[in-house]
């Protein structure tokens, strides 16, 4: 802003002609804006003085026309700068709230996933195995109603619920010997090895989920 513009705004009031000179528009353009926003304010025979709030309103009006200079090129009034500052502060407050809510949501998701991630990592670092039921629960599936019926239908389990050769060759199950509690007899039992969990996650679980959907239709 040059010295002339600064002194005019410092005086707090300006005439229609002074406003027109500052904004590089005709007196009539300013007059039309005054009559539009402040009807009856202009009185014949009297000099019309415009205060800062009125000039700001007029500036926004005339800068909206395509043949005039843009708002960014026009002199800024103190009131307009205060309004802009308020809008920026309001935007910052809203943005901070949105980011905080997004962060809380991600933290909540991590909290829910943490036990599964920890158990999966722990199992992968060990040589332990888990039952089909435990494996099913690990992936959020119901063993009796979903997993066992699928494995039997797809011939991964035999009628005695031990791994078929197909399951062993597909590297999704293994066979281990377990001693029964009631009689002490050693019997074969299906199990899932730690190294086979990734095959379950990428190959078996998606197929089970599709199978469940198809049986719900």
Image (cartoon, rainbow, N blue to C red):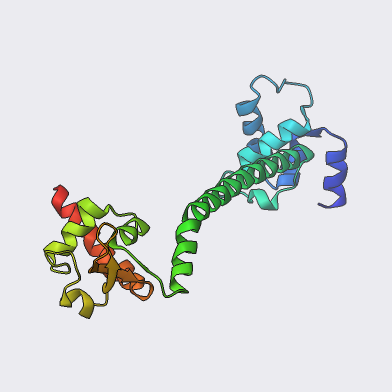
Q: Position of residue 129 (x, y in %)?
A: 36, 69
In the rendered image, the vertical position of residue 108 relative to residue 209, given as above or below: above
- Of residue 24 and residue 37, the one placed in the foreground of this image is 37
Q: Quadrant of residue 86?
A: top right
Q: Is residue 173 left or right of residue 27?
A: left
Q: Position of residue 159 (x, y in %)?
A: 11, 64
Q: Is residue 212 left or right of residue 10?
A: left
Query: Residue at 79% of width from left, 40% of height from top?
Result: 78
Q: Is residue 160 left or right of residue 116?
A: left
- Of residue 196 and residue 184, the one placed in the foreground of this image is 184
In the rendered image, the vertical position of residue 177 relative to residue 67, given as above or below: below
Q: Quadrant of residue 151?
A: bottom left
Q: How many marks?
A: 0
Return the residue found at the far bottom.
Answer: 169
Query: Residue at 22% of width from left, 77% of height from top?
Result: 168
- Of residue 21 and residue 83, the one placed in the foreground of this image is 83
- Of residue 205 and residue 82, the one placed in the foreground of this image is 205
Query: Residue at 84% of width from left, 40% of height from top?
Result: 8
Q: Position of residue 34 (x, y in %)?
A: 66, 29
Q: Position of residue 9 (x, y in %)?
A: 83, 40
Q: Is residue 195 left or right of residue 103?
A: left
Query: Residue at 27% of width from left, 52% of height from top?
Result: 142
Return the residue found at the far front.
Answer: 183
In the rendered image, the vertical position of residue 58 relative to residue 108, given as above or below: above
């Amino acid at each position: 802003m040059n010295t002339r513009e600064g002194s005019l705004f410092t005086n707090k009031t300006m005439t229609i002609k002074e406003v027109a000179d500052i904004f590089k528009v005709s007196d009539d353009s300013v007059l039309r804006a005054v009559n539009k926003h402040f009807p009856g304010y202009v009185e014949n025979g009297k000099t019309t003085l415009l205060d800062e709030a009125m000039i700001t309103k007029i500036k926004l009006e005339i800068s909206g026309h395509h043949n005039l200079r843009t708002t960014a090129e026009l002199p800024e009034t103190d009131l307009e700068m205060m309004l802009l500052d308020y809008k920026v502060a309001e935007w910052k407050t809203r943005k901070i709230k949105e980011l905080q809510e997004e962060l809380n949501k991600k933290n909540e998701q991590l909290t829910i996933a943490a036990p599964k991630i920890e158990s999966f990592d722990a199992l992968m670092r060990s040589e332990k195995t888990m039952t089909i039921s435990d494996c099913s629960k690990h992936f959020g599936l119901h063993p009796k109603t979903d997993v066992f019926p699928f494995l039997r239908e797809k011939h991964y389990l035999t009628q005695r619920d031990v791994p078929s050769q197909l399951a062993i060759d597909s590297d999704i199950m293994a066979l281990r010997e377990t001693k029964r509690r009631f009689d002490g007899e050693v019997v074969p039992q299906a199990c899932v090895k730690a190294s086979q969990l990734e095959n379950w996650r990428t190959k078996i679980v998606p197929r089970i989920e599709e199978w469940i959907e198809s049986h719900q239709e």
